[in-house]
Image: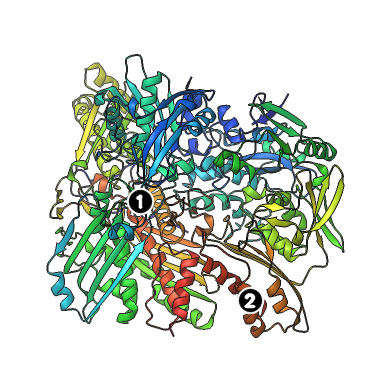
Amino acid sequence: MTTIARPVGSPHSPLSRRPDDAVVGTPLHHESAALHVTGQALYTDDLVGRTSHVLHAHPVQAPHAHAIITSLDVAAAYDVPGVVRVLTAADVPGTNDAGVKHDEPLFPSEVMYHGHAVCWVLGESLEAARRGAAAVAVTYAELPALLTVEEAIGAESFQGARPTLARGDSAAGLARAARVFEGVTSFAGQEHFYLETHCSLALVDENGQVFVQSSTQHPTETQEIVAHVLGVPSHAVTVQCLRMGGGFGGKEMQPHGLAAVAALGATLTGRPVRVRLTRAQDMTMTGKRHGFHATWRAGFDADGLFTGLEATLTSDGGWSLDLSEPVLSRALCHVDNAYWIPDITVHGRIARTHKTSQTAFRGFGGPQGMLVIEDVIGRCAPALGIDPAELRRRNFYVEGQTTPYGQPVRHPGRLVAAWEQVTRTSSLAARRAEIDGWNAREPHRKRGIAVTPVKFGISFNLTAFNQGGALVHVYKDGSVLVTHGGTEMGQGLHTKMLQVAATALRVPLARVRLAPTRTDKVPNTSATAASASADLNGGAVKDACEQILARLAPVREALGEPSWEELVAAAYRERVQLWAAGFYKTEGLSWDAATMTGHPFKYFAYGAAVTEVEVDGFTGAYTTRRVDIVHDVGDSLSPLVDLGQIEGGFVQGAGWLTLEDLRWDESDGPGRGRLTTQAASTYKLPSFSELPEQFHVVLLDHAHEDGVVYGSKAVGEPPLMLALSVREALRDACGAFGPAGFSVELASPATPEAVYWALTAARGAS
Amino acid sequence: MAEIVVNGRPRDLTGVAPHTNALDFLRACGLTGAKEGCAEGECGACAVMVARPAADGSGTAEWTAINSCLPPAAALDGQEVVTSEGLGTPDALHPVQHEMAVRGGSQCGYCTPGFVCSMGAEYYRADRSPAGNGGPHDRYHGANGFDLHAISGNLCRCTGYRPIKDAAFALGFPASDDLIGQRRATPAPSAAATSLEADEAAYLRPASLTEALRLLRDHADAVIVAGSTDWGVEVNLRGRRAGLLIAVDRLPELRGFSVTDAEVRLGAALTLTEIERRLAGRLPLVTAMTAQFGSRLIRNSATLGGNLGTGSPIGDGPPALLALDAAVVLASAEGTRTLPLAEYFTGYRQSRRRPDELITEVVVPRPVSALTAFHKIAKRPFDDISSVAVGYALDLADGVVRRARIGLGGVAATPIRALATEAALEGRPWSAETVDAAAAVLAAEGTPISDQRASAAYRSAMLGQSLRKLYAEATP
């Protein structure tokens, strides 16, 4: 059972004011749903059969985690029937680099991780390219490899900035605490496992213009990297993204090098080139969510209020920087989650390891920061003798307090409202008592329940990225074509943008159509990331529509009450420009990366979740019995879309925390550094068996967000962190196997095996 | 001429290489609805519906969902396939497509065509029975009789599954004028004898067992395929290629099924789904095993013969069959022989089956023990590979364990019997003390290793815990 709350609000700013007959706010299904379900929706690789003379690319992947390439002999590949070309570093006309930090050689001379692509073979068929790749002879001089964060810390192998977020005097905060606890919290990363693997298809026209169709969340940056590798200006490269079969952050940076390989191949051969990774290639070559290692000391006063926190967070960055620095910044900015910690010092650093270069993943460090503080609370609560739900609630921010980086926490009452609503509607108190009764009766199966909050900052930490663009065409017949800078990866952005345009222009939804995202339509876009794309592109679409409406106003006035079609036709005759480029930038932001202070976020998205689980004491296997969520999306632009983001984000977060288990070969054997879970058969995603038996999601009422497009809030990432309630519920259930007050340490992911060891430790602690 | 009828239209198979899977073939035909998500039958994005003989043996056709990434395209010679494009169009959505679309069942949409086909097959399942008609109605079964296990082999990374479940449970029943539904009334296409050669390799589907055995005798390096759920993974992920593939999945001699007081005979080429349906609970241990064997998509293709033929130490069939004292019937051009399963496995993926021999049947003696159970330890409850699997068959009389058979998977290079544990149980009272002592013995059986699925310590612990769990659950 799911209910959708009606949006209510008291709008003030013109941007957030919502007309009575708004198309935004109506629950629509995904704009491409009919194409999805009939198999008609096209993804990048579906274009291959519609393109003539395509060459297929296959990588030569290194079988070592760290090595110098001592020789590369491609001659034998050309003996394989169907092989057309082998791409190596010598072929790069521009810069041999695929990263914005210039630390990612596209064709490396030093292998930095197991599976690193050394060169690429182009063939008439994928089979020919695969056989050609197998024929390439590479010799390597192996070097020592660092696989774990602990190994990297031991070797002092770090990369990038080492920021510190601090407020007050954390030593004094700990000194005045009634109780001080310390611990280590380590947790794994996560594979994106978008169902559509990376894909690019590049063509070169008669004039040397490069056209790359790419499954990318960041077409502008893909364009820039392609141009950079080819040594041409950006205007010589166009990138288009039709839609993605999932992104989740994994296609923010990772597509660029692959698009560059396709573009390079197309440039050199004059033929279209397809680069599509198999699942194993995708998993072994592209970055993942960062795993972290954290050490911490936390102080609480006699009432259980935080007095201070000192922590060092070390992320596992993999072989290159990629987005590790901003991910770390966001992790530091979310260690507080929803809690007032008066005196705090959090150090951050990025380990350089010989693994894939870890990257953006839904939440972008936020989940990692929050996991640390929720782990602290989950472990300390039993020792403090305070119910974890109560301990969390006591420490919530109140109006007037600021985050450790100095931004006032606006609307903390909304979190309280969400928390109180979800604890009430889930009957938390009554079920706590029922569960205690069940646990007292049942020796072999224990249940656990937990409630956790989410406070997540919306906007890119880096202020410059907080801009959006759109191009709105009104044709003479009154039909409307919208292009904007955001990409569609399933999150429903295009659906929302259609609703925004229809609302702004006051035309029926059916009059508006959306064109695929292209860099020659809307330039200089930001990544579709940070949950902010509806805010940014919605603001830009609305701006473009309002420019057009302003030009139409005199015509409308002259005509009385014309229909939209009459108005548009008349305006054309009067030579009124019927299209406009819209722009939006988020006001009021600031961020100083050196001091880690400022006002980086436009607002906070809030939510709270209650989860109940049942654990089998024999095996550690568990089921999620019930989940209740109240989440703040402002005045929803599109309630069905937002509901889907909340549910999907939650289940994806639960996957990260409980099931998805990235394992690298950390042995000293010949496979050292190999990802051993590189397939769907070994890396298990949530399937329908992980769907909570009961799943109740409600959008927070009275949540109008002033100053954001039609009063809405971002929704892509924040709900993922609601899944921390699953982990805490598992901790609670494990604790029920042991004596009261036992502090349960739970590995992450909390697989059945991890849960078994945790409950076994609890059992042994009587 | 070799061809597949896809969405009512014949598609020529001439020149298609034996290593080309059905998915790539369909996509090359311009039918790009089915997607590759994993190329190993784990995600279901490539699912399509195939008209197969009804799993209950009734002789009519049944729309069966399979992973198209696994079988060679050649395996579908003469068959009828329906893809998401064939179910409906954006202007005329199929009921399954309609429910998926309006309930938010698609987000990125990439997995959706596969979900639609898995759901379509369940929509058309002839014995789908609404709760009001005696069908089950629980966490996994809708009031409309829809069994969610039908989509256990389909992964969605976006929605979290709730809207897909709601769409499934909202489905009605096919209208009488539904052409795809009507197709079920007449027999499925028979298996066409096929001989396709391309890219220096051949795919042969012999018409008879005699011919199959002759081919095996003459081609020692031939690869035998049935559902291709294992071979397809080898081809797609590990680049294996065979000079000669011999398809045996539709040979009548391998598709027998009989139940007498003395034994149950299961044709080696029956799919797990067919075994499940036709046994109808008559071998509870096998039913418990099949319920946890892969996903529905896999069970619709995988065969017991294949599971024993590949001889994987982590296959789910052997632990159950070892506990049941099953035997394997092996046929060759020279004749047949029957081998107890306990003597069949000789090493990692090795067995006593000679290259010229074919597994034709599995024989389970009856009556079977009263207390049987199948315990599978895995990260995910459905569609996962076992870390450890245990099959139990215990005879109890007057509170004493008269006979114990325990089969184990995942703890050695081959499936094994837990002989020491059986000895520790037999002749002793079925009591907590006996179970505790035997559990310690069981925990020391085999030589479990640590890998990405589980640690050796957890595997050993789970062996002992399994017996304790069996006792706790069998003792009210």
Separation of disc 1 and disc 2 at Cα?
42 Å
Q: What secondary structure is found at the residue carrying circle 2?
A: helix
Residue under numbered circle 1: A144
Mark 1 or mark 2, whichever is nearer to me = 1
Give coordinates of residue B415: x percent, y percent: 67, 60
- Image quarter (top left, top right, bottom left or bottom right) of the N terminus of chain B: top right
Residue A448 located left or right of residue A706: right
Q: Chain of mark 1?
A: A
Mark 2: few/some/many CA within 10 Å (<14, 14-19, 20+): many
Q: What secondary structure is found at the residue carrying circle 1?
A: loop
Number of marks drawn: 2
Give coordinates of residue B11: x percent, y percent: 65, 26
Mark 1 and mark 2, same subunit?
no
Q: Is residue B9 above or below residue B169?
A: above
Residue at 32% in and 25% down: A565
Foreground of the two, A294 or B397: A294
Residue B160 located left or right of residue A472: right
Residue under numbered circle 2: B441
Foreground of the two, B109 or B319: B319
Give coordinates of residue B81: x percent, y percent: 66, 35
Mark 1: few/some/many CA within 10 Å (<14, 14-19, 20+): few
Query: Can you tell which mark lies on residue B287?
Result: none
Q: Quadrant of residue B225?
A: top right
Give coordinates of residue B201: x percent, y percent: 67, 30
Foreground of the two, A229 or A561: A229
Q: Amino acid at mark 1?
A: Pro
Foreground of the two, B12 or B55: B12
Q: Amino acid at mark 2?
A: Val
Residue at 81% in and 57% down: B339
Q: Chain of mark 2?
A: B
Q: Is residue A216 above or below residue B273?
A: above
